[in-house]
Structures are given as C-alpha cells and as structure tokens.
Image (cartoon, rainbow, N blue to C red):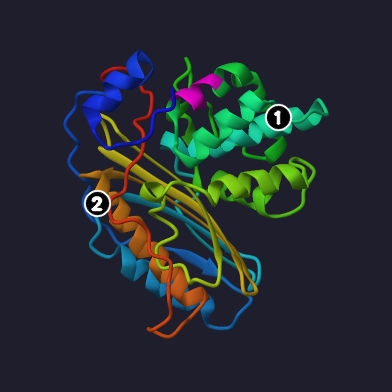
Amino acid sequence: MTHRTSGRTGVLAAALGAAVLIPNTVAAAPAAATTPTVSCASGKAGLAAKLQKDITAAMAGRKGTIAVGLRDRGTGTTCTLRESTAYDSASVVKVTVLGTLLWDAKKHNRYLTSREVTLTKAMITQSDNNATSSLWKQLGVTKVKGFLTAAGMTQTKPGANGYWGLTQITVRDEQKLLGLITAKNSVLSDNSRAYILKLMGQVVSSQRWGTPAGAPSSVSVHVKNGWLQRATHGWRVHSVGTFNGAGHDYMITVLTQDNSTMSYGVTTIQNIAKAIHKDLIPTTSAATRYAPTTSPKEAFVAVPPGA
C-alpha cells in the first residue's frame, strides 16, 4: 500500500504503524535570532557582495539555526553558511538512498528491478516512508557508507537501527551530492543521474516548497524536502534543489532547525531561495515565476519514540 501525505497526523501514524513513530513532544523554544555571516565568492563582478547582502537580509530576524549552500557553475559562484554543521536529515536523505541504489546497481552492471522502480518513484515523488525503509533495509548501512565514501560525502553519518531519518547531513555533503547528480562523474552513470533528476522533477505539488520558491520559469526545478520534529531543537526543515536552463546551472541547499513550527522553517527557506534566484537570474516583476505550494506537507519520518 502506498501512503500519500495527507497532512493528517493521526491517519498517517495509524496507517504507517510502528515503522513510523511520531514523538509526542512539545517543540523546543526557538534559538535567539542572530546575524550569521554568509561567505560568497563569484567570478561575476559584484555578484558575491549582492548575494551576501540579500541572503543575510532574508535571514534577518529569523529565529532558528540556518545553514546555506549555493553553487552556480555558470558564474563560478558559491555561498556558504555553517556548511559543516550536522542536522538530522529527515526525508532529504532519500536522495542519498536512491544514489546508493543506483551506484550499487552500476557496480553489478544491472538495471533496477520493477519493484525497485516502484519503490524509488514513491520514495522521491511522494516521500513514501515505507518504500524508503524497504530500500534502506535492502541496501544495508554498509552499502550506504560505501556510496558516501565514493561520493566524498565524508561528513554524512547514516542513522542507526533503521532510523534513516536521523542520518546526519551537512550542507557541504548535500552540495556534493547535488553536484554529482548534475554533472558527469565516475560515481553515477549518466542514466542514473537522469533518473534521479527526473524523479526530483516529479515531486507531488504539496511537497514542492522550499528552494524552488522564486525560481524563474526559464529553469527546470528538481527538489527534495524533509521535515521532522523532535524533543530537542524543535522542527528541522530542509530543502535541496537543482535548477538548470537558460544558460544557468545551480544548486541550493538550506538546512534549518530550532524552528517553532514547520511552516516557520519553510518560510525561512523560501525567503533565502527567493533572494538567491532573484540575484542569479534578475527578471522583470511581471515575469512568470515558479510558485511553490502554499500548503507544504510531507510524510512523517521514522524516529525512535520520545527522541
């Protein structure tokens, strides 16, 4: 049975059973707002300073702990903030699970089975947790670690005891993964990369929030999001996305925690994304731009009870 994300906590909990345990906790109080420093560099005159100013402005007054990564191949631009700070992955790790499966299949010179195709599509486009748990169990942590090593994702630590949603991720490693997905390399085949991008481009509308906010209509959007509430650090809300077209090729990762609600974290991410898209691809105010859903939803991630 495929479990779609209805946003009804009780229904989801009952439907997904013991595999998805939702901690009965009160969100932690958000951390005090600070003025973090974003570091940017660019081969295009003036762009680094503009991005640094506008991303900082987008975060002004926002509570929580925010980590940001931007890479634009076309202009040789990068921006980073807390790139090595570890966060619980929530469903963002599902892209890593898919990468591991495709990397392992390539090693054994085989195609995905029809079962694997069904599971991977549900895992990425609907953020289906049962599908993810099946693939995580099939692969095993050893293979996941093997992929992480091959990908150079040395800061990522797989979740223990089947709790893939507690995998520790960083902006640096997520940007490395997005880089592998979007350019020819020896880790993932061209067909594998195309498959990952295809699924990330078909995410259901209720989960197309986050980094796509404000993206111009001239670029294709590929996204994977995740959120998770725990007893410490409140809500984790994350979004990774790649954007390609009209002479542009860039990727954005925003990881957050200490959010009072899921929607608060979504707003923080989308404020940052809008600033980035606007600076990279300035358009007139009348231009049609990609608008993410106004009602973000996602399946609840498997975590230990009371964690």
Q: Which residues are magenta?
A: 130-134
Nearer-the-camera pick, 118 or 240: 118
- The residue under label 2 is which amino acid type? Tyr
Q: From the viewer's perspective, tell me whether residue 4 is left or right of residue 45.
A: left
Main secondary structure of the magenta stretch:
helix
**Which of the two labelled residues, at mark 2 and mark 1, occupies the earlier sequence position?**
1
- What residue did someone put label 1 on? 112
In this orientation, does residue 183 appear?
yes
- The residue under label 1 is which amino acid type? Leu
Q: Residues within 10 Å of mark 2 (few under 14, many from 20)?
A: some
- Residue 61: percent from left, percent from top: 23, 62
Farthest-out residue, right = 109
Task: Tell me the quarter of the image containing the N terminus.
Answer: top left
- Residue 181: percent from left, percent from top: 66, 49
Nearer-the-camera pick, 205 or 90: 205
Specify whether residue 131 is painted magenta.
Answer: yes
> Where is 224 relative to 241, above or below?
above
> Where is 47 relative to 277, above or below?
below
SS under mark 2 = helix
- Residue 185: percent from left, percent from top: 77, 48
Nearer-the-camera pick, 170 or 236: 236
Q: From the viewer's perspective, tell me whether residue 256 is left or right of residue 51.
A: left
Count the labels in the image: 2
Task: Tell me the quarter of the image containing the C terminus.
Answer: top left
Q: What whole-number distance in Å separates the C-alpha atoms at marks 2 and 1? A: 38 Å
- What residue did someone put label 2 on? 264
> Where is 38 relative to 179, above or below?
below
Q: Which mark is nearer the camera, 2 or 1?
A: 1
Residue at figure coordinates x 44%, y 27% from the top left = 2
Q: Which numbered disc covers residue 54? A: none
Residue at figure coordinates x 32%, y 67% from the top left = 58
